[in-house]
Image: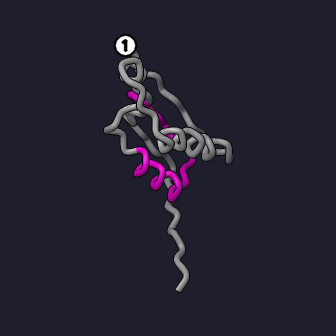
Amino acid sequence: MTWMAKMHDYRTIWISDLHLGTRGCKAEFLLDFLRDTEAETIYLVGDIIDGWRLKKSWYWPQAHNDVIPEGSAQGSQGDASHLRPRKS
């Protein structure tokens, strides 16, 4: 029996508060989600990268690196990705 992953299609996905750069970030779960999902538009809002935390102690595993190309790959396929910076 051949395993085929089911691709999910959405019009819009909102992803908030990833907190890349922290030990609590669930980058692996996000990668699984992005690889199994297609969307016309992906909005990234809130704290995507915790720069203030990285200043205190550096924590950036490979999974955090992998999130960036995976998200931008969807945007490069003609879909829209939007980064909404947090207002102070």
Q: How many marks?
A: 1
Q: How is this picture coloured?
A: one colour
**Start-end of magenta stretch:** 27-48
Instruction: Report the residue at 42% width, 21% height from top.
Output: 51
Image-quadrant location for residue 86? top left
* Residue under pointer 1: 88
Residue that protrudes farthest toward the front in the picture = 57
Q: In the figure, 53 relative to 14: above or below?
A: above
Judged left or right of residue 64, residue 46 is: left
Residue at 68%, 47% in the rendered image: 77
Q: Please tell me which residue lies in front, 56 or 11.
A: 56
Q: Residue at x 49, y 53 (%)?
A: 10
Q: Quadrant of the C terminus?
A: top left
Q: Determine the secondary structure under disc 1.
A: loop
Q: Is residue 75 above or below residue 57?
A: below
Q: Position of residue 59 (x, y in %)?
A: 41, 31
Instruction: Pick out the residue farthest to the top.
Output: 88
Query: Where is residue 79 shown, x and y percent of the image?
Result: 62, 44
The kind of residue tagged 1 is Ser
Label 1 crowd bin: few (<14), some (14–19), many (20+), radius 10 Å:
few
Which residue is at 55% across, 43% downward? Answer: 71
- Give residue 56's position: percent from left, percent from top: 36, 19
